[in-house]
Image: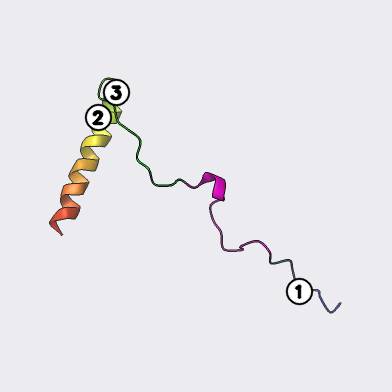
């Protein structure tokens, strides 16, 4: 067993889960009703209901 057997390079963040290039800045994308399909409209409606439930608390 060498002296540095268990020491590893710790320059990276070992707890990082998502690569920086895949993180978003939190900006919402504009929604167009003309280009929306049924699934988009359903998701929009679910989101609005969730917002109402969150505001009640």
Percent across and percent down for residue 36 are 29, 24
Residue on which disc 1 sits:
6
Please state the extent of the stretch shown in magenta in the rendering.
11-23
Query: Quick check: is 14 in the magenta stretch?
Result: yes
Q: Is residue 1 left or right of residue 16?
A: right
Is 40 rendered above or below residue 22?
Answer: above
**Quarter of the rendering occupied by the N terminus:** bottom right
Front in this rendered view, residue 12 or 47: 12
Q: Residues within 10 Å of mark 2 (few under 14, many from 20)?
A: few
Q: Secondary structure at mark 1?
A: loop
Query: Quick check: is 15 in the magenta stretch?
Result: yes
Q: Residue at x 24, y 42 (%)?
A: 47
The single residue placed furthest to the right in the displayed view is 2
Confirm or deny contact between disc 2 and disc 3 (CB under 8 A).
yes
| Tally of numbered tags | 3
- Quote the CA–CA distance across marks 2 and 1: 54 Å
Earlier residue among tags 2 and 1 = 1
Q: Secondary structure at mark 2?
A: helix
Percent across and percent down for residue 2 are 86, 77
The single residue placed furthest to the left in the displayed view is 56
Q: Is residue 17 left or right of residue 12?
A: left
Residue on which disc 3 sits:
37
Residue on which disc 2 sits:
41
Q: Is residue 22 left or right of residue 39?
A: right
């Amino acid at each position: 067993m060498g002296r540095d057997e268990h020491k590893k390079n710790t320059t990276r963040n070992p707890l990082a889960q998502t690569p920086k290039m895949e993180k978003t800045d939190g900006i919402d994308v504009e929604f167009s009703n003309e280009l929306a399909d049924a699934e988009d409209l359903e998701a929009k409606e679910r989101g609005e209901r969730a917002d109402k439930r969150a505001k009640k608390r």
